[in-house]
Image: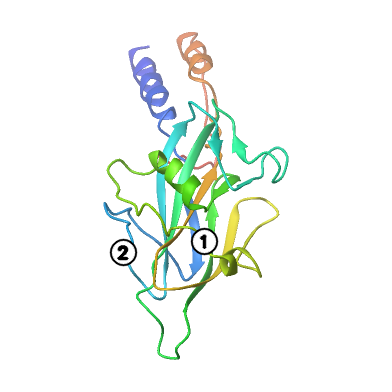
Amino acid sequence: MGKLLRIFLLLASSMGNVQALIIELGGDALLGVQPANLRNHHYESNVNVFAFNEQAFVLTEDLSVNREFEFDGDLNNAIAAGTHINSHLLHFDPIGKDKKGKWSRAKGWITFDTDIIGLIYSNRFLRGSDFLSQPGTLFSKSGRKLDKHELNHGGWNISADSRTLWFDWKAKPAVDQLRVITDPPVNVSAPSSLALLLLGGGIFAVGRGRKLLA
């Protein structure tokens, strides 16, 4: 019984920390560890859009987003307080024009292990959601929004299963950022139910092929 109880305590403590993650990317997307400084001209590349996993969070108030997909398309523009979410950031900060005299361009895709439920890309809403980033990260106060040509004409698209974001961005030598809000992973079983099962002398099994992401 002591061994089963220790297993339960380990599983129960880890369930609350499970975070939705970026699981695949391609093209010019590059997965990175979020640096301390993401202000303009501090984390630059003419060819790569950097993708960062930010934090898992339970909203204490409504979160303003530019696009909200889960309930009523683009009409609500807010994710309700009490919602469990995960945050991710896309960052594109070109150094300057390329050799052909055109603005830098990057295109690719990013796949998450849960559904995309919101996008944030205006200066105001990016600033208002920076609490979702890694603690202490520095951001520019303005000039972070996606430009019109990045929002229109195929600048981004989301897959039918709501888990992959495609992007095709042309940017000036200044920072452009997009915050992606996703659902949290679904817990396989509640800790209280697992406790009853273990303490009652039951047995449990984890199905083959299921991945637990920490």
Helix, strand or loop status at disc 1: loop
Q: Is residue 150 above or below residue 186?
A: below
- Front one among 209 and 146: 146
> If the image is split into quadrants, where does the C terminus sit?
top left
In this figure, which residue is indicated by the disc labeled 2? 43
Quarter assignment of residue 155: bottom right
Q: Is residue 6 above or below residue 85?
A: above
Residue 145, how many percent across, how many down?
Answer: 48, 58
Q: Depth-wise, is mark 1 or mark 2 nearer the camera?
A: 1
Residue type, label 1: Leu
> Are the two marked residues, 1 and 2, in contact with CB atoms closer than 8 angstroms?
no
Q: Which mark is residue 13?
A: none
In this figure, which residue is indicated by the disc labeled 1? 146
Within-10-Å neighbours for mark 2: few <14, some 14–19, many 20+: some
Residue 204, how many percent across, how many down?
Answer: 52, 24
**Separation (CA) of disc 1 from disc 2:** 17 Å
- Front one among 127 and 79: 127
Residue type, label 2: Tyr
Helix, strand or loop status at disc 2: loop
**Rendered residue at 51%/11% (across/down):** 196
Within-10-Å neighbours for mark 1: few <14, some 14–19, many 20+: many
Q: Is residue 204 visible?
A: yes
- Front one among 157 and 142: 142
**Rendered residue at 38%/22% (across/down):** 7
**Rendered residue at 33%/68% (across/down):** 44
Report the side of 100 relative to 45 (left or right): right
Q: Residue furthest top?
A: 200
- Front one among 40 and 114: 40
Q: Is residue 20 visible?
A: no
